[in-house]
Image (spheres, rainbow, N blue to C red):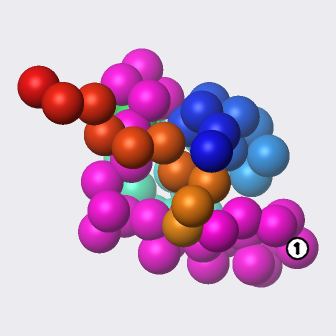
């Protein structure tokens, strides 16, 4: 399991992920701050990783903290 920040860095940074995933940069930045990516957004990050040749799987994402 990684931090969201390390995942985003491996994919080129939050601005790159926002652009390539067509996601508002503020949304991606909020994932970094909260260390959580919603499950329904993870396929987008996995697709970006595949396109870039970065090894990333569902198990790499941190679990969402209990409220």
Whether residue 22 sits left or right of residue 51 in the image: it is: left
Vertically, is 40 above or below 25? below
Q: What stretch is highlighted in magenta?
A: 32-57
Residue occupying image coordinates x 60% and y 33%: 3
Look at the image and say whether residue 25 sits in the magenta stretch.
Answer: no
Where is residue 43 shown, x and y percent of the image?
47, 75
Between residue 66 and residue 24, name the one nearer to us. Answer: 66
Between residue 66 and residue 55, name the one nearer to us. Answer: 66
Numbered disc total: 1
Vertically, is 14 above or below 18? above
Residue at image mark 1: 53
Q: What element carries label 1?
A: loop
Q: In this rendering, does residue 35 appear at all? A: yes
Image quadrant occupied by the C terminus: top left
Indicate the quadrant where residue 34 lies: top left
Residue occupying image coordinates x 75% and y 78%: 50
Residue occupying image coordinates x 29% and y 69%: 40
Where is residue 6 shown, x and y percent of the image?
70, 34
Where is residue 9 shown, x and y percent of the image?
75, 37
Examine the residues drawn in magenta and state their main secondary structure: helix
Whether residue 7 sits left or right of residue 55 in the image: it is: left
């Amino acid at each position: 399991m990684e931090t969201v920040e390390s995942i985003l860095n491996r994919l080129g940074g939050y601005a790159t992920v926002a652009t390539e995933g067509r996601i508002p940069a503020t949304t991606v930045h909020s994932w970094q701050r909260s260390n959580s990516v919603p499950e329904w957004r993870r396929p987008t990050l996995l697709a970006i990783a595949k396109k870039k040749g970065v090894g990333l799987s569902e198990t790499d994402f941190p679990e969402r903290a209990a409220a």
